[in-house]
Image: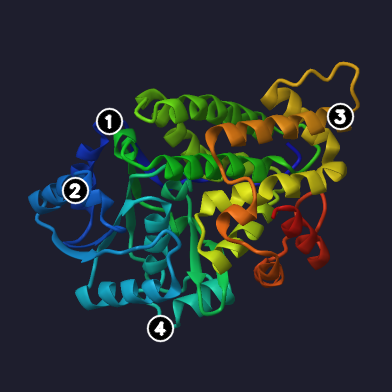
Amino acid sequence: MLGNFSYKNATKLYFGDDSLKYLNDELPKYGKNVQLIYGGGSVKRNGVYDAVMQILKANGKTVVEDAGVMPNPTAEKLREGVRIARENNVDLLLAVGGGSCCDYAKAVSVSVHCDDDPWDKYFIRFEEPDCEIVPVGCILTMAGTGSEMNAGSVITNHEQKLKIGHVFGEEVMPKFSILNPTFTLSLPKRQMVAGIYDIFNHICEQYFSGEDDNTSDYIAEALMKSVIHSSLIAVEDPQDYEARSNIMWSATWALNTLISRGKTTDWMVHMLGQAVGAITDATHGMTLAAVSLPYYRFIMPYGVKKFARFAVEVWGVDPTGKTDTQTAEEGLAAMEAWMKKIGTAMDLSELGVTEDMIEAIADATIILDGGYKALTRDDVVSVLKASL
């Protein structure tokens, strides 16, 4: 561990098939007015909404509903949520849904008492909150983003064709999150798979950087092996509680900042995938899957030792008699075979991308440092074309 760092995670988790009852322990800590945030209505169909409302009413809360949070929450929706919170003087933002609902709740939380436009302040100028923050709680119904235990928020602006994430400070982390794996069992299979790949890629983004012997990388390898193992079970039997619970727990630890400690990180797959999402509105995890292998094959020569280690430690490739490059290539081939087996998108054309969109996607791609090679815009275009 060569890096210097501090670490704190302020979110309290309740995990398991009876975890919803602990909402009774949390609600008395906050004021009377609760903004209940959810998406397209699946929480009503699967009974989660009724169960949550029963607990809110039993605790004497006044509930204002904020429904219709879309998979890629927009700047327009964010402004609507801020207006709802202000008009109702809310004391707690309770997100019931997947990562998009959690992301959206955090973006609302830092905007309610701020006069600036939230998109301009947080996602264009990347300023930090300088006003009172409304506390957030999460009840998770989809595993993938890790938003339940981090301070990240991703918002899309269709007018500007941008999808941008802002990682806030610890004060924006959810105060509590309830993780009941049974709430994820009714998800359509494609959404489950998209979440699984989002988890795996979060780990990769933090793993493929640096050359030192780093404890964080050993943890990352264990998480990747767990995701691979449980995903293969879950795609065969989506009702397997043990597999789904392990996937849910891995999602949380993949992006609660633990495995990024003491090292650099490389978030270019997310930058590429988010740019695709900004143009197409395609499912986040699938955009990541479509660009991952072309990107990793592009940068592999610059970090070949780590890619060879990935092949051996995560995929079980035997390195005997092989160069690091040969071993690394076998590892990426094994990753490709796994992705096909669980059913991720394998190229951008599956997501509606055509060659004439490439330049616009490149324009929407934020280029970051931190990986084995800093991309140029021409490199971005090359990777995107290889992803078609």
How many other residues sit within 10 Å of disc 1, few (<14), some (14-19) or many (≥20)? some
First in residue order: circle 2 vs circle 4: 2
Q: Which mark is residue 17?
A: 1
Name the kind of residue labelled 3 in the image.
Gln
Q: Tell me which numbered mark, 4 or 1, is placed earlier along the sequence.
A: 1
Tell which circle, 1 or 3, labels the residue nearer the N-terminal end: 1
Quadrant of res 245? top left
Residue 293 seen in the figure: yes
Q: Which amino acid is tagged 1?
A: Asp
Dot 2 alpha-carbon crowd within 10 angstroms: few under 14, some 14 to 19, many 20 or more: many
| Residue 317 or residue 313, whichever sits in front | 317
Residue type of the residue flagged with mark 4: Asp
In the rendered image, residue 272, in percent from the top left (x then y), is placed at: 66, 59
Q: Tell me the quarter of the image containing the C terminus.
A: bottom right
- Depth order, front residue of 337/324: 337
**Residue that numbered label 3 is attached to:** 326
Q: Which mark is residue 52?
A: 2
Q: Secondary structure at mark 3?
A: helix
Q: Please give the name of the residue rendered at 34% of the width and 28% of the height, measured from the top-left corner.
A: 239
Sequence-wise, which precedes: disc 2 or disc 3?
A: 2
At numbered mark 1, what does the secondary structure look like: helix, strand or loop?
loop
Dot placed on the residue nearer the N-terminal end, 1 or 2:
1
Q: CA distance from mark 1 to mark 2?
A: 14 Å
Q: Which mark is residue 115?
A: 4
